[in-house]
Every structure is written in structure tokens, then in C-alpha cells.
Amino acid sequence: MNRRNCWICKMCRDESKRPPSNLTLEEVLQWAQSFENLMATKYGPVVYSAYLKMEHSDENIKFWMACETYKKIDSRWSRISKAKKLYRIYIQPESPREINIDSSTRETIIRNIQEPTQTCFEEAQKTVYMHMVMDSYPRFLKSEMYQELLKTIQANNS
């Protein structure tokens, strides 16, 4: 998704554009109450991901979402395959979307992916979640993207 194709970005650039009709002011206001509220709504994760992509820092949300999907895998073989893929993309040093985790967490994951369980990425996922809560989420709330979206929806409700 680039800035030219993103409906959120287009809407922020062009005031005549409207957000999806089922994106409500109530939902957008909920996002500012807590990170949990942002992630629990229909459009919150989509808008937040778009913001992080614009900031070139979307690896955390992508990893977190991939972990949520990973935890639901029942098949042992599928879990092994997905665990190795998550490692290659997010955990391995110098990987394409390497996340910021400490070395002991990384070493634990390396040991655990030999026989991966549904929780083998849990510590890394918690770390990434805290990075988002403490760092990128407050920036998102202050961002032009969020402020313009809020202003547009408020204007549409008047």
C-alpha cells in the first residue's frame, strides 16, 4: 500500500473524500482512549497499520498480527512451517523486518522453534506490543493522519 492508493491517505489529502460510511465518530474517538480499544475496533488496526507503513515502521504491527494468527494454528506441521517463516522475517538478525527484542528473547525463540508451541513467540509479542503502546501509538494519536481523519468524521457528523 503506498500513499497514492491508501484510502486514508487520499482522504487526508482531499477534504472532499469521505471515510467509509460505517467508520463512526464513536469508533475513531475510542482509538484515543487506549491502544486496546484501537486494536479491538474494525478499522483501528487498518488505520494504525497504514500510519506505521507511512512512518516506515510497520514491522511491529505485522509481527504482532502474525503472532495472533500463529497462535490459532492447530496443525503441528503448519505451526513448524509458520514458526520458521516468522523467525526468518522478524527475528533473525538482519532479517527484512527485524523487530527490536533483546538477545535472551531471541535465543529463547531460536531454541523453541525446533519444536514450536503456540506460545513460543509470546515474549517477543509482548515486547513488540509494549513498543507500540509506549512509542508509536502516542505518535499516531498526534499524527496528521489521525487528526485529519477525526476532523473529517466530526465535520461529516455535523
Image (cartoon, rainbow, N blue to C red):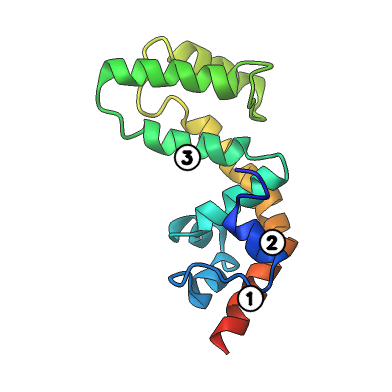
Q: Amino acid at mark 2?
A: Met
Per the image, the residue denoted by label 3 is 65
Instruction: Say which element carries label 3.
Output: helix
Position in image of residue 134 (x %, y %): 68, 50
Badge 2 element: helix
The residue where tag 2 is placed is 145
29 to 154, vertically: above or below:
above
> Closer to the camera: disc 1 or disc 3?
1
Amino acid identity at mark 1: Thr
Q: Residue shown at 55%/31% (left/top)?
A: 124
Label for residue 97? none
Whole-number angstrom distance, CA of label 1 to CA of label 3? 28 Å
Q: At 44% across and 14% down in the image, what residue appears?
A: 113
Residue tagged 1: 152
Give the number of the mark in front: 3 or 2.
Answer: 2
Depth order, front residue of 2/42:
2
